[in-house]
Image (tube, rainbow, N blue to C red):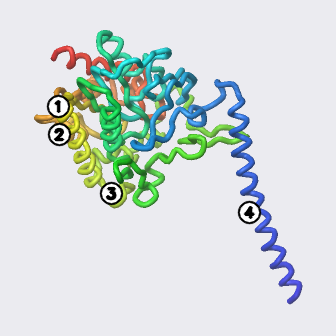
Amino acid sequence: MRMSWIRSRAAKESLIVLVVSIILLLLIDYFLGYAILKQAPISTRNNAERGIKIRHPVYHHTLSANYDGLGRNQSEYRFCTNSDGLKSKCGEVSDHKKIDIGFLGDSFTEGLGLPYEKTFVGLIAEKLPGKKIANLGAASYSPSIYYLKLKEFLKNGYTFNEVVVYIDISDIADEANYAIVDGKVVNTIGSTGNRKLFPLLNFGLKGLRDSSISAFGILHHDYHVDHLDLTDAVYQRDFRRAAWTFDDSNEGYGELGVKGSIDKSIAIMQKLYDLCKTNNIKLSIGVYPWPSQILYDTEESNQVKIWRNFCIDKCTNFYNSFPTFFDLTRSTSKKEVINNNFFHGDMHFNENGNQIIATDFLKIYKSN
């Protein structure tokens, strides 16, 4: 009996030692890993741990001001911001607060994976050299952040002739997990979200986001392929972050559900419209498909219907790029359109895709 008790106690002590050792190892790994990465050449470090994304006290998160370094998606690219904390041409000095066109959006508008000049906002700015254009977009934004970011810029003395909101497919998912509390955007993902569906949005220690840092290596979703692999998760019909436009099941959208998240997004966009109207700002909205829409949805997607209807009597222009991409599928194939215009294994546009968005915008903008 005594031997059994001794063995049991020894087993418990061994388990405690093991757990404590693992915790210590993880802590040492994290802090040592960050210290090593901080001293490493810029070409070996990911954008997340280098502080491009930072917290904001009102609209949750933003970009660091006066940043000039390397960003990383599937490859490294030069990432620059101006003194307003907006992605911009490198070396650009923001010495004015009067903006002709302000673009709001998430990672698509920010231009994830590309330098400013190759993003659709940068391409538009190049074709409209007489206009003061500002890219207020950043990853994981949605209507609540669009609204409060614009409100904060206006409060700080900025003026806009027109605001163009490129509403992303993922905005409905993100909006399910944001709330405006006491005039600030807070993240409610812990209580109403699905961590498998939604990206990490808390921007915690060292600005760590959407990647893991380790002294033993950087874990990051790189896709080094030269062909489209339709087995990737982003191309699956049940990829919940995108599937709401053709499948409104509730999975992962918390207490609101898909319909509730849509209704909330529309309500917040109404607040943004009212803010624009009060400040004599023209409002326009733009939409575009993800690979999921090209594969499983139609040209008359719910994303198109919702925001086109919203725009009635509110918007100066409705920039709809769904027809352009679907026209391309009819002249080539769905697979080829995705392969040519999106990063492989990713929903974001590559340089070609950004060019399509810019061309569609300029066609309508110049005609008016």
| Residue type marked 1 | Cys
Image position, residue 18 (x, y; %): 77, 62
- The residue that label 3 is drawn on is 250
Q: For mark 2, give the secondary structure.
A: helix
Q: Residue at 47% x, 46% y: name it.
A: 201
Give me the C-alpha separation between circle 1 and circle 2: 8 Å
Nearer-N-terminus badge (1/4): 4
Looking at the image, which is closer to me, 284 or 261?
284
Q: Is residue 166 left or right of residue 39?
A: left
Looking at the image, which is closer to me, 6 or 237?
6
Q: For mark 1, give the secondary structure.
A: strand
- The residue that label 1 is drawn on is 315
Give me the C-alpha separation between circle 3 and circle 2: 23 Å
| Residue type marked 3 | Asn
Nearer-N-terminus badge (1/3): 3
Q: Residue at 21% x, 18% y: name it.
A: 365
Q: Nearer the viewer, mark 3 or mark 2?
A: 2
Looking at the image, which is closer to me, 330 or 6?
6
- The residue that label 4 is drawn on is 19
In the rendered view, would you say 299 is above or below 238? above
